[in-house]
Amino acid sequence: MIKKIISSLFLLFSIVSFAQEGTSSPYSFYGIGDVRYKGTIESRSMGGIQVEQDSIHINLDNPASYSNLKLTTFTVGGGYNMTTLKNNVSSEKAKRVTFDYLAVGLPMGKLGVGFGLIPYSSVGYKINSYTTEVGQTSSRDFATGGLTKAFFSASYKLVPDFTLGATVEYNFGSVETTNINFVNGVNIGTREINKADYSGVNFNFGAMYQTKLNKKLNLYSSLSYKLEGKLASDNLRNIVVVSTSNGVDISAVETPYEESFRTKLTLPSEVRFGVGIGESKKWLVGAQYVMASEGNLVNTYNVSSNVSYEKGLKYSVGGYFIPNYNSFSSYAKRIVYRAGLKYEQTGLIVNSESIKDQGVTLGLGLPITGSFSNVNLGFEFGKRGTTNAGLVQENYLKFSVGLSLNDRWFVKRKID
């Protein structure tokens, strides 16, 4: 049954991941868009930490985790996002439903492998800039698209408490932006459409180690390093004079100008280190630090003189608590209760303001009775950006739900 579920969801996910508009943020104009992927729901519910060598949950951030799986594991997650975007003048609300990830992990003794798809970044905004005076220039800007990652991971358990792993990722997707400029009182304007088709490969390496401090307490650690990746962008630019009505283009009035060319972008490298302490199947408290290089993600359609880039940083603390994982009398005691805090310097600087993201996370792991599978719920609320320097602050609330389904594959049948 789980095999049929996986096949069906992979097909559905493949279709939806290309079609969905996963963000409404004006900051998605820059770089490769709004990086939506923040880890699995289990990890995000703890502020982003994922340091334990888990046997029934997939860790998508450290490839060394797969050899710790005891059962074939399938995981899928999605979310409902509500965002209030505001500046010093006004505010707007936006809502989005997204698929966040889909993956399979296969244990093979000391070896473990995994593969899946992740909608990594999204571009999606609509910005209107109107003036009321006749003869003044107004504009409309909107965009859609983003990047998706297809990945394959493998890890090997060198000794019972130490594993190594590697991931190869193929990044692909497209972004289309449209800009319409017109003069109030004049029914002629210009429309520029830029389309960029992206593709490229990068690699991630990881290690995980745990040791006992005493009979009950364990020390967990996780380290991964993602290399800089090259991203090729095949660009098409189309510029044409159009007739307009209130900034909406009606029809082209002359032959368009078109050009195609290729640019090279660099995905940033990333170091991720986490450490935690806890009692197995009871509780865990941990912290994680992530540092990313600046990379080079500026394409021809999103060059801006008021924008620069810096190193990305993220600090997370969080953990979980299980009252009694094998309780027969109380379902509530078997629930995993998660919580965390996060603070992120996104790496984007606009109008000399560093764009930051900070929030509080909560979550529940609901066991499915009679199995090792579970339903995971996550809640995140926080803010990104600022209203300083004429910028936009995003106050967001995200509700996430995911499945972690576990089954035993590749078992030889025995006949008595």
Image (cartoon, rainbow, N blue to C red):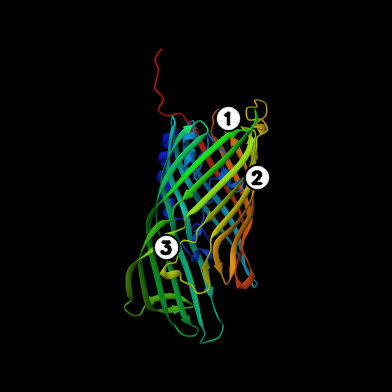
**Answer yes or no: do the residues labelled 2 and 1 have beta carbons within 8 Å?**
no
Label 3 vs label 1: CA separation? 44 Å
Element carrying mark 2 = strand
Measured from the top left, where is residue 343 in percent x and y? 62, 55
- Is residue 219 shown above or below 242? above
Measured from the top left, where is residue 316 in percent x and y? 61, 50
Q: On the rendered structure, is 197 left or right of 93? A: left
**Answer yes or no: do the residues labelled 3 and 2 have beta carbons within 8 Å?**
no
| Residue position for label 3 | 175
Q: Disc 2 residue type?
A: Ala
The residue at the point 54 percent across, 78 percent down is 130
Q: Disc 3 residue type?
A: Val
Q: Quadrant of the C terminus?
A: top left
Measured from the top left, where is residue 102 in percent x and y? 46, 44
The residue at the point 58 percent across, 38 percent down is 220
Query: What crowding class fits label 1: few (fewer than 14 Cα within 10 Å), some (14-19), or many (20 or more)?
Result: few
Label 2 vs label 1: CA separation? 23 Å
Query: Disc 3 or 2, which lies upstream in sequence?
Result: 3
In terms of depth relative to the viewer, which is nearer, 161 or 50?
Answer: 161
| The quarter of the displayed image where residue 260 is located | bottom left
- Is residue 391 shown above or below 57? below
In terms of depth relative to the viewer, which is nearer, 220 or 19?
Answer: 220
